[in-house]
Amino acid sequence: MAQRNTWQRERVRDALADARGFVSAQSLHATLRDENTGIGLATVYRALAGLAASGDADSLQSPEGEALYRACSTQGHHHHLICRSCGLTVEIEAKDVEAWAHRTAALHGFTEAAHVVDIFGLCTPCAKRKQAQESASA
């Protein structure tokens, strides 16, 4: 069943596009609440799920198990580098990962293999900030 294109869904889409990196539904809802939109948390969840299903948003699970969303700037299959500190996200191609996934699936008799690979780490500015903090406290 297709989702209606309501003003609430469009406002969630806009807020997601304005967000830096991946955000949770709760975080996005807090932003919308602060703007006095009147959009409820359940509406935010439904809109994000619809955007992810249609390919207009990326969805992933954080290391802590929370669902996170980001406006998708690349159509088709891709992967992400995600800063654990500031949330900066870089979309990447990973041809070696693609080849490995298909080889591994075939080796075990699987076809139509699909996978999700997201790499979490620290971006250069956050790594430098962390190093400076560690040096200062030593």
Image (tube, grey):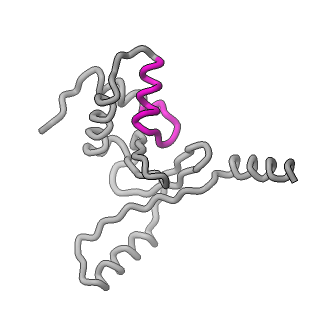
Q: Is residue 53 above or below residue 26?
A: below
- Residues drawn in magenta: 16-34
Question: Looking at the image, which residue sits at the far top?
Answer: 36
Extreme residue toward the bottom, this view: 107
Residue shown at the point (44%, 68%) measured from the top left: 95
* Relative to 77, 129 lies left or right: right
Tell me residue 37's x, y (percent).
38, 16
Q: Reply yes or no: does residue 27 show up in magenta.
A: yes
- Residue 114 pos. (x, y %): 30, 66
Q: Is residue 22 magenta?
A: yes
Give the left or right position of residue 53, taking residue 135 as reference. Answer: left
What residue do we see at 18% from left, 33% from top? 3
Residue 67, placed above or below residue 78: above
Q: Quadrant of residue 78?
A: bottom left
Residue 94 position in % (x across, y down): 46, 65
Q: Is residue 54 left or right of residue 65?
A: left
User: Of residues 49 and 92, which is closer to you in this image?
Assistant: 49
